[in-house]
Image (tube, rainbow, N blue to C red):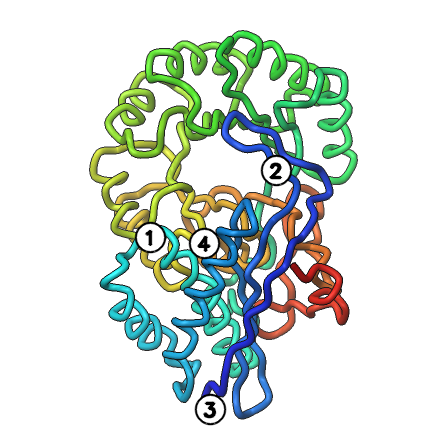
């Protein structure tokens, strides 16, 4: 089997709910969508994104450049193909836009490899789980007034979620604590709550806020400080009884090792596109296992669920609905878990008019 070519499409996918955090304010996922084709009629897919159109245009150019390296290669030799692209990226480096551009191609190659084996990707990766515990992450943003925040949280419970994440990170952290308290009172003690500060606080504030959140039985505090401050994150994790989660903003498994070496957090959550795709995501998961560190995920629910299903030390899958409208078979959540699709590869069927409907 040989890869014959790759089609790169630029999409502007509108979010069902615009996003407001301490670091973000946007309404579309500007997406670079990859379709990798073979001489045996199989098509593998993957995608990456940016928060604005010009940055996504740059990612598309990089993806087209790397895609040429895959032509004529066997998609089943995924790690060998990744190594070829990795070597080519040396001048631009193994972080930033080049890693993000690689991610869609590497994911598409894994999709093809599992399709060729006629098994779902998680089976191809050695996974046996058919469901992965998840949490709702497509809401509970900072711009919601408390009443609307509470209503949205109750809606997630009604939709079958048993866990959800509330965004925090205001300068007045006690205002965040009060918002989270209202959500906790509304959903009850049996629902798992996380909070995400999106790197908003200095170390001292994060520790003070964390101690307040501990009294509300919060499962983890995510990204309390700037992502490069590994030592600060480690001190926060040591100071708090609750979990600290981080890692989504760092690039590649080498960065995950840096987190592990300093014990920067209790849970690491690699981001598929900042890992450069599934290949180095798997390397990061293996490192976490070696350090006896739980692993979660960041975004890209449709692909990340396959990776986590193959990790015995996986803790929780982030469910974000940003790309569900592209597919005929969107993610299924049942009793707090995402159900693994049973089709070969990623198990996704692109909706016939999706690329034209969302063309940028």
Is residue 335 found left or right of 115 in the rendered image?
A: right
Image location (x, y in percent) of residue 247: 37, 40
Q: Nearer the viewer, mark 1 or mark 3?
A: 3
Q: Secondary structure at mark 1?
A: helix
Q: Using the image as rendered, state which of residue 131 and residue 71 is in the foreground.
A: 71
Q: CA distance from mark 4 to mark 1?
A: 11 Å
Residue found at x 58% / y 30%: 165
Determine which quarter of the picture holds residue 118. Answer: bottom right
Q: Which residue bears the numbered disc 1?
A: 284
Mark 4–mark 3 contact, CB under 8 Å?
no
Residue found at x 55% / y 92%: 40
Image location (x, y in percent) of residue 127: 48, 63
Sequence order check, earlier mark of 1 and 3: 3
Image location (x, y in percent) of residue 87: 25, 69
Q: CA distance from mark 3 to mark 2?
A: 41 Å
What label does residue 1 carry, if any?
A: 3
Q: Using the image as rendered, state which of residue 144 and residue 14 is in the foreground.
A: 14
Sequence order check, earlier mark of 4 and 1: 4
Q: CA distance from mark 1 to mark 3?
A: 29 Å
Sequence order check, earlier mark of 1 and 2: 2
Sequence order check, earlier mark of 3 and 2: 3
Mark 1–mark 3 contact, CB under 8 Å?
no
């Amino acid at each position: 089997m040989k890869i014959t070519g790759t089609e790169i499409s630029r999409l502007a996918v509108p979010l069902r709910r615009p996003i407001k955090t301490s670091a973000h304010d946007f309404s579309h996922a500007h997406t670079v969508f990859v379709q990798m084709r073979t001489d045996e009629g199989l098509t593998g897919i993957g995608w990456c994104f940016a928060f604005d159109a010009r940055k996504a245009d740059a990612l598309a150019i990089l993806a087209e450049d790397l895609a040429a390296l895959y032509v004529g290669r066997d998609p089943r030799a995924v790690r060998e193909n990744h190594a070829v692209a990795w070597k080519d990226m040396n001048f631009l480096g193994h972080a930033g836009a080049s890693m993000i551009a690689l991610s869609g191609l590497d994911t598409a190659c894994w999709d093809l490899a599992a399709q060729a084996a006629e098994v779902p990707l998680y089976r191809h990766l050695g996974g046996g789980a058919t469901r992965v515990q998840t949490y709702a992450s497509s809401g509970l943003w900072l711009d919601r007034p408390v009443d609307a925040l509470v209503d949205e949280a109750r809606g997630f419970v009604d939709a079958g979620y048993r866990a959800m994440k509330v965004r925090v990170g205001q300068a007045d952290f006690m205002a965040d604590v009060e918002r989270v308290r209202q959500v906790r009172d509304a959903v009850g003690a049996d629902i798992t709550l996380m909070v995400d500060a999106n790197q908003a606080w200095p170390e001292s504030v994060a520790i003070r806020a964390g101690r307040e959140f501990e009294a509300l039985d919060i499962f983890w505090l995510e990204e309390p400080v700037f992502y490069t401050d590994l030592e600060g994150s480690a001190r926060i994790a040591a100071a708090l009884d609750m979990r600290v989660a981080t890692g989504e903003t760092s690039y590649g498994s080498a960065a995950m090792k840096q987190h592990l070496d300093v014990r920067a957090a209790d849970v690491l959550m690699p981001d598929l596109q900042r890992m450069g795709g599934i290949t180095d995501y798997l390397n990061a998961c293996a490192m976490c296992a070696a350090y006896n560190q739980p692993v979660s995920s960041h975004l890209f629910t449709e692909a990340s669920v396959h990776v986590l299903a193959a990790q015995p030390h996986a803790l929780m899958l982030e469910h974000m609905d940003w790309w569900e409208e592209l597919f005929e078979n969107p993610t299924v959540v049942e009793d707090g878990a995402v159900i693994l699709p049973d089709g070969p590869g990623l198990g996704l069927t692109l909706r016939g008019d999706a690329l034209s409907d969302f063309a940028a």
